[in-house]
Image (cartoon, helix red, strand yellow):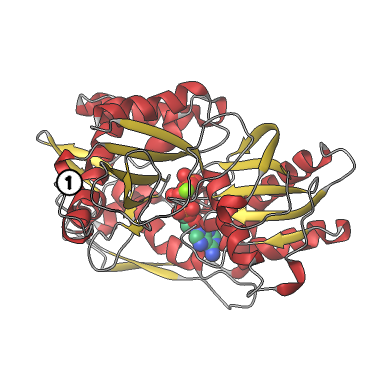
Amino acid sequence: MLASGQHLQQDSDRPSCVKKSSYSVATGQESFCKRICVDFGTSKLAGSWQISYADESFYQEPNDIDFGNNETKLPNAATWVDGEFIFGRELENRLLREELAEDLVIRDAKLAIFADPMTQDIKRQVDAQLGALGKTKHDLVVCILRHMISEAKIAMEDNHGYSHDLNEMPMKLFLSVPQMWDAAANRVMSVAAEAAGAEQCELVYEPLCAAVQVLAEQLKPLHDPRITSWFKPGDEIAIADLGAGTGDFVRYRFLSDETEGENVRLKTMDAPDGALCGSDYINKAFMRALEAAADISALANKLGFSIADLKARVNTGFEKKKLEFRDDKPNYDFVVLGGRNARQNFQKIDVTPEQMRSFFDEVIVDVVNKLKSIMQKSEGHRVRAIILTGGFGSSSYLQKCLTDAFERQNVRILAPRHKKL
Ligand SMILES: Nc1ncnc2c1ncn2[C@@H]1O[C@H](COP(=O)(O)OP(=O)(O)OP(=O)(O)O)[C@@H](O)[C@H]1O
Ligand SMILES: [Mg+2]
C-alpha cells in the first residue's frame, strides 16, 4: 500500500509531495481535510484514508480501507451491465456464478493508460472492450476512483473520530503512478480524480513510496543493527518495483544518511526505465505454453465455458500455484471445474517444477537485464542495494536469482517483509 502520510523530502522532479510539519493535537478550531490514498495497481486496488488539517500541519495516522471481511485489496476488474458499473469483488462473484461473460471484463485498465509500444496490444484490447460497452478510458478510471472514494467514505463515517461533517471537508486524493509513466498517462489520472470529486489530487511515485517503506522496515535498528549505517550520502540504491504489470526501475542517490520514512532524502538519477516484467507475465508465459500444448477451444467446449471464461478460470488456478513456487516442490498441478453446462466435470492441468521455473525465468531475465542496465549508469558503481518492491518482489525464487546475479558486486537485495507493498 501507499505510504500515505509519509511525506518524502525528495529531490526528484515530478510528481511533487507536500511537506509535513510535526504532528500536533487537534484543537477543534481548525478546518479539516479528508485525504484518500489509492494504490491503482494492475491486478488490485488498495487504499487508505486519514483526516488532516486543511493546511496539512496535522495528520491522523493513515487507516487501510477495509472492503469487508478484513480484505484490503480489490481485484482491478470492471465492466458495465445495463449501464451499472460492476467492479472488484462483486464482479468476481458474478463471474463465479456464471452471470457475467469474461469477454467484456476489463482487467488491464492500468496497462492501457500508458501509451507505449510495449503495451500496444493490451491497449487495443481494452479500447475494443470499452468501445463495445460504449465507454471511454476516462469513464473507466473515473468510475473506479468513485468506487474507491465511496468505500473510503464508508470506512471514515464510523471511524474518523471527529464531530465534523465529512461532506463539508474538502477531499485530497493521492494516487500512485509508475515512475516510468509520461505526462499524458499522469494526466489521465489527475483529470479522472477531479471528475471523481477530488478538490485536490497529488500523484506519487509507486517505487518511491514502496522503497521508503522497505527502508523504514529493514533499516530500523530494531530489525538489523548492522545495517543502519549501510547507506552513506552519495550511496545509491536501485529499485525494481515489480507488481503485476510493468516493472519500474529507478536509481536513487542518498543525499543524507537518514533512512527512516519521511526523513529519507533521495535524488532520482537518470530517467526511470521499465519493461513488461511484472508477475502477470509469468501467467502469460504459462498460458502461451498451454495454448501450444492443448486445444483450448475443445477444452472450453467440454467444460461448458467460452474460451475467455475458461482462460480466466485456468489463470486463477495457475495464480495460486505460482504464489507457492519454490524450487523444492514436486509439482504444481491444479484442477479446473466444469461449468453448469459441462460435458466433463473437471480438467487437471499438469505443471512441473521445471516448467514453472521456465515461466519465471522468462520474466526474470528482463528484470536482471534492466537492473544491470541502470546499475551500469552509476558512475563509480555506487549502487549498494537493490530494493525489490511490489508483490512479485516477495518471490523467494526471484530474490534467489537476483542474489546469484549480483552477489559478486557486493550488492544487497532488500525485499518487503509485508506483501502489502
Ligand atoms: N511469491 C510471488 N511470486 C510471484 N508473484 C507474486 C508473488 N506474490 C505476489 N505476486 C504477484 O504480485 C502481483 C501483485 O502485486 P502488486 O499488488 O504489487 O501489483 P499491482 O499493484 O496490482 O500491479 P502494478 O503495481 O504492477 O500495477 C500479482 O501479479 C501476484 O501474482
Ligand atoms: Mg502496485
How many C-alpha atoms fall within 10 Å of the one at disc 1: few (<14), some, or many (≥20)?
Answer: some
Residue 11 drawn above or below residue 27: above
Of 307 and 137, which appears nearest the observer?
137
Question: Does residue 101 appear anywhere in the picture?
Answer: no
Front residue of this view, candidates 312 and 385: 385
Mark yes or no: residue 85 visible.
Answer: yes
Q: Is residue 279 above or below residue 401?
A: above
Find disc 1 in the rendering and name its residue: 166
Judge from the rendering whether residue 37 lies leftward or rightward of residue 226; answer left or right: left
Residue lying at 48% horizontally and 28% vertically, measured from the top left: 114
Q: Residue furthest top?
A: 184
Q: Position of residue 350 (x, y in %)?
A: 49, 67
User: How many marks are shown on the rendered structure?
Assistant: 1
Query: How far across and down, in percent of the image, does residue 23 sit?
Result: 43, 54
Which x, y percent locates residue 317? 39, 63
* In the displayed structure image, the side of residue 391 where residue 64 appears, left or right: left
279 or 162: nearer the viewer: 162
Measuring 24% from the left and 32% from the top, which residue is drawn there? 196
Identify the element where label 1 is drawn.
helix
Screen quadrant of the N terminus:
bottom left
Amino acid on which the number 1 mark rests in the picture: Leu
Q: Quadrant of residue 249?
A: top right
Q: Nearer the viewer, residue 413 or 336?
A: 413
Give the side of residue 332 with respect to residue 104, left or right. Answer: right
Residue at 83% x, 40% y: name it.
376
